Image (tube, grey):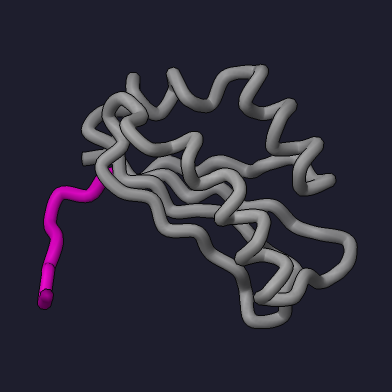
Amino acid sequence: MIITQVIFTLDDPISLEAATAIFESTAPKYKSRAGLERKYYIRSENGLNVGGLYFWTSRADADATYSDDWKKMVTEKYGATPVISYFDAPVSVDNT
């Protein structure tokens, strides 16, 4: 499994309500995305950083999503360039 963290650093803080509205508007684009097992939208408590944690079956699936068109779309939506970090996830704990 590959996990990516995508972060946007905003010039001005965004409220939880405003972030939720944006997140809800983009969530349908990720339904049935090839290789995407799960996505969590995230917002820092101070509202200056937003983004997502993506759980992928492979690096190739992640890279297919993070195209130039995707980067342009999200940069326009958030007014900030995304910073994408990749992580291996060799072990997990699920307490649900």
Q: Classify 33 as above or below 93.
A: above
Q: Where is residue 3 shown, x and y percent of the image? A: 34, 46
Q: Residue furthest right?
A: 11
Residue at point 12%, 69% (across, down) = 94
Q: Is residue 93 left or right of residue 50?
A: left
On whether residue 86 falls in the magenta region, the answer is no
82 and 29: which is toward the camera? 29
Q: Where is residue 28 shown, x and y percent of the image? A: 47, 41
Q: Classify 22 as above or below 83.
A: below
Residue at point 48%, 50% (across, down) = 5
Residue at point 76%, 42% (across, down) = 77
Q: Quadrant of residue 26?
A: top right
Magenta span main SS = loop
Q: Quadrant of residue 50?
A: bottom right
Q: Is residue 10 left or right of residue 58?
A: right
On whether residue 94 falls in the magenta region, the answer is yes
Residue at point 11%, 77% (across, down) = 95
Q: Where is residue 82 shown, x and y percent of the image? A: 67, 42
Residue range in magenta is: 88-96
Q: Is residue 15 left or right of residue 5?
A: right
- Image quadrant holding the N terminus, namely top left
Q: Classify 68 as above or below 82.
A: above
Q: Where is residue 73 shown, x and y percent of the image? A: 71, 30
Q: Residue furthest bottom?
A: 45
Number of dots carrying numbers = 0
- Image quadrant holding the C terminus, namely bottom left
